[in-house]
Amino acid sequence: MRISLSLLVTLSLAACGGGPVESFLSGPASIGPVTLLPGIEGSPCEAASSCGSGFLCRKIGGSGVCSRPGVENASCADTSHCAAGFICSSSAGAGVCTRPLVDLRVDVNRDGIVDVAPGAADDLDEDTWNATHGAIFLANIDDDEVVCSRTVTGDVQLAACNDAADEIVNGADDLLDMAVMKVAPWAAAPMTATGKLLSTPPGKIRIFKQTAGNSWELFDEYQNVLSADELKAGVELRVEGKDVVRDSAVWDGYVSVTLEVSGIENTLTDTVKLRTSPVMTFHHLEAPQTSYVTRVPRDGSSTAFVNALKGAIANTTEKAPLVEIADNDQWTQDFFETGYMTMPAAGGAQHTIRVAYRSASLEQGGFLRPAGRVVFTSFRGKDAAGLQAWSPTQDGNSSSLNSYGNTETIPPYSHNGQTYPLGRLLRGAIPSFAPDPVLSKMMESQAVQPHLYVDTSWLLVGHVDETISFLKAPNPRGWVLLVNDAAQAKAMLEAQVAAGNGNVQMHVGKRWYNYNTNQYYSAAISISQVLANTEIMAASAEAVGEVNAQLEIIKAATGITEAEIIRVPFLHYKEFGYSIAYQPGTVNGFVAGEQDFISPDPFGPVINGVDIFKKDLEDKLATVNQRVHWVDDWDLYHANMGEIHCGTNAARVIPAAKWWEGGR
Amino acid sequence: MKALGMMVVLVSFAAFAGPVSDLRQSVPQADAKKRGPLAAGLKPTLLAMGEGVIPELIVEASRPADPSWSESAALAWRVSVLEALGTHKDARARPVFQRQLADTSAPFMVQRAAAEGLAKLGDADVLIAQLDRDAVVAGIGSARTHAVARALALELTKQPSPARAKLLVKALGEVGNAWAWATLPVRTEELATRNEAAKSLVAAYVKFDGEVRNAAATQLLIVDSPSTAAFIAQARAGGLAVPELDALSQRVASKPLGR
C-alpha cells in the first residue's frame, strides 16, 4: 500500500481535528510568566495547547478533554479523535479509530501470486516498474474457446476477433491469461466508503471483478464502483490487455491502475503499475516444438519435399512434429513468424500466449498475402494468437521485405556493456528499401529484442536468411554465425580445376523446369564453365562485398569474431539486376533441433565420390556438434529463389530467460 | 497495311513456336510460385535451352504479354527474355535492345535489361551518350571498358541526387568487378578500368554519406583495385579525410575477394 504524500498530509490534518495548526500541536505551553502544567489524560482543555505532549484536545459535546489520539480500534466520535493516519469508522455503530486500508495489489514481486498480507513484497514499490520488480499483464488476444470465425474474408475483420475483443471472461482458460489484481480487505471500512478503479492511460486494459458465485463481470472504470461491503471483504480482480504495443511513441506498454476510495473524510488512493508483455520471437538456440511446412496441393515437387523433410526431421533429436499447411503459397517461412508473450506464473514459471505475426506483404488488389491468414484461421486458439499490422500505402517495391525470411533473431549475447538475453531481431532494411513501416514500428516497439538492420537491397528476394543463420555451439558465446561466402566457393572450385577436375560437373541431375509442359533442361554444368561464366563471377564478387558489409554491422553490434563465424560457400548469379544463390544456398537451412541442421543439398561437384560442398559444411558444423541433414529442395525452392528455410517454420520452446529481467 | 503487319507478326510467332513459347505458357505458374517481387527461374531455363532458341527469343521479345497475366508475370517474362538474350551476346538481338531502350515509357527493369543487353554487345558509346537515364546507368556496368568507367566517374562529379549517385556507384562496381574481369578474354583495359572505378568510388565515399557511402565502400571491395589503398591515402592527403576512412582502409585491406 502506498498513499500519496499529499493525502497523508491531509489525513494528518483531519486526524487532528481539522482546526488551526496549533490545535494539533501538542506539548508544553507557556502562558505569561506562569507556567501551567500541561493537561494529561482526562484533563479539561480548550485546545491541544492545553494538553501535554502526545495528547490532543478531544471535543465531546461542548467541552474538551485531553486525550491520547486514538489508534487502531480506539473509540472515537470523529476522526479528530484518532491519531494521524487513522480515521474514525462508525461502520460498526460506535466509532472506532482505524487505519484506512486503501490497498490495491498486483504481482509486484513476479512470483505468480498476489499476496495481500500486510507488508508483503507485492506492496513494495508497487507504483514503479523495473528489471527487479513490477507487475505484468498480457494482451489477451488469443481465442481460448476457439469461437472466432475462421472464414471471415476481410483482413481487418479476421483479425478483430479475440478474447480481448469482448467484455466477458471467456472461460476458465481465459482467466489464466489475465493478471491478478486484488483490493486488500479493509474490514473496518466505513459503510459510506466506495471505491473506483482508474487506469492510465485509459483504454489499454479491461478489468474484471469476481462476483458471488465465482463468476466474473466487467468492471467499467467509468460507471462501476466498489461498495463498502466489497472494500471490507476485499475484491478479486483480473486485468486483460486489449492489444499489444503497436507504437511505443503512442503507448509504451505501461499502465497504472489507481484504487480511489471516497466516502470517507478524505479520498484516498493507491496506485500500482503494470507493463504488458512484449511479443518476442524465437532464436535458433531454442529447440523446436512444432515444425511447419506447406504442402502445395497437386504439386509433386511439394509432396517430394514434404516427405524428404519428414525423413530428415525424424532423424533429429527433438523430432518436432511437422504440421502441414495446405496452401498454394509454398513460402512457409515468409507468411508468418512465430513468437510469444509471457507473464510470471506460480513456481517461477511463465504463463505464455504464443503469437504468430502475419506477413504484411500486400498483394495486387491491396489485400494482405492470403496464406498469412493461417495465423488466425489455424493457429489462433487457446493460448495462441495471431497478429498483423501493415500500411495500405506500403512501398510495393520492398514488399518482399515483409516476408519473415527477412526477420531472424540473433541469439542472446552481451557486448560493450549491453546484454541481450533474448537476442535481437535481424532484418534487412535500409532507408530507401525497407519493410512496411507500420509492421516495423510494431516490432520495434516490443523493445526487448532491439532491431539490427543490414542491407539486403542487392538481393532479388531481399531476405536476411539468404546469407545468414545462427546455430547453437559449445563455445563461450553459445552460438556461431553461419554466413555465405562466395569467395570460399570460388576458391574451392578453383582448387578442383588446379587438381585437374575442371570438367567435373555440378548440379548433376538437376534441371530447369517448364511447369506447363513438364519439359526440363539440364542444370548440370562443369566447374570450369562456372568459373568462366562472367555473370556468375560478377554476381558472386558482388555477394562477397555485400555480405562483408552485412558482417561488418553484425560484428560491430555483437562483437562476434572470425572464430565464431562459419563460412558457408556458394556462388550467386543475377536475375532482374539482383542477386540470388546460384548454387543451393546452404546457409538457408532449417534449424530443426539443437544439434540438427537441415540444409539444401548443394549438388556440388563429386570428387572421388564426395560432394565437396557437402563435405565442407558437414566438417565445419561437426566442429560445433551439429549434424547436417540433406534435403533436395531444387525444384520446389531453389529454382524459385528460395531454399529449405524459406519453406519451413518452427515454434520453439519458450526461453527460460524472462523478458522482464532484461532491463528494457 | 497495319493488318498485314499484324499478320506478319502472328506468322512469325507461329513460325517460332517452340520451347520458348512453351515456357511462356508456364509464366503464370512461375509467377504464382515466386518468393520475391518477380518470378525467377525463367531466365536460367531459357539459357538452358541453348543458343538454338535465340531466334525464338528475339521474336518473343516483341510479343505482348498475355492480357490475363498479372503485372508481375508480364514484367518477369519480358525482362527474363531480354536478359537471356543479353547473356547470349548475339548481335541479332541488338535491334531488340535498341527498340526496347528507346521506349522510355517501358518499365525501368525493361529499359535496364535492354541497356545491359547492349552493354554486353559492347555498345558502350551508345549507352554513354544516354547516361542521363538511370536505367542506362543501371545496365551499363556490363560494358567493361575504361571509357565507361570514366563516364560514370564524370557523372558522379555532377552533384547527382543520392539515389542517382548510388546507381552510379553500383555501376562503377559492376564495370570494375574484379572477378568479372578475370573471365574476360581481353583484359587490356582491366587495370585502368578498375583503377578508374576505385578512384571514383573513394571520392564518392568521401563526398557522400548514408547509403551512397556504404555502397561505395562495398563496391570498392568488389572492384578490388590494387590502387585503392593509394587512393584512400590521397584522399587523406588532399584534406578530404573523414574519420571513416580508417575503417574503409581496414575493410579494403582485408581483401574479402581474395582471402
Image: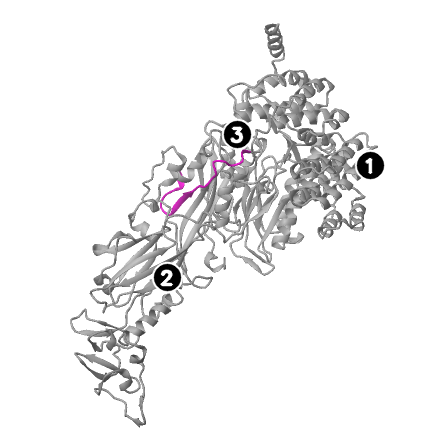
Q: Is residue A391 magenta?
A: yes
Q: Farthest residue in the right direction? A: B188
Does the CB distance between marks 1 and 2 fall below 8 Å? Answer: no
Q: In the image, residue A588 lies at what x, y percent?
A: 58, 41
State the separation of the CA atoms marked 3 and 1.
44 Å
Asked if residue A361 is positioned above or below residue B56 in the image, the reply reads below
In the picture of the structure, the residue carrying the numbered disc 3 is B33
Asked if residue B18 is positioned above or below residue B108 in the image, the reply reads above
Hey, what amino acid is under mark 3? Lys
Using residue B9 as the reference point, say whether residue A78 is left or right of it: left
Q: Indicate which disc, 3 or 1, sits on the residue closer to the N terminus.
A: 3
Q: How many marks?
A: 3
Asked if residue A611 is positioned above or below residue A32 in the image, the reply reads above
State the separation of the CA atoms marked 2 and 3.
52 Å
- Is residue A114 visible in this depiction of the protein? no
Q: Is residue A409 magenta?
A: no
Hey, what amino acid is under mark 2? Val
Q: Nearer the viewer, mark 1 or mark 2?
A: 2
Q: Nearer the viewer, residue A303 or A336?
A: A336
In the picture of the structure, the residue carrying the numbered disc 2 is A272
Q: Nearer the viewer, residue A405 or A278?
A: A278
Span colored in magenta: A377-396
Hey, what amino acid is under mark 1? Ala
Does the CB distance between marks 2 and 3 fall below 8 Å? Answer: no
Q: Are marks 2 and 3 on the same chain?
A: no
Question: What mark, if any, has residue B192 been given in the picture?
Answer: 1
Label 1: chain? B
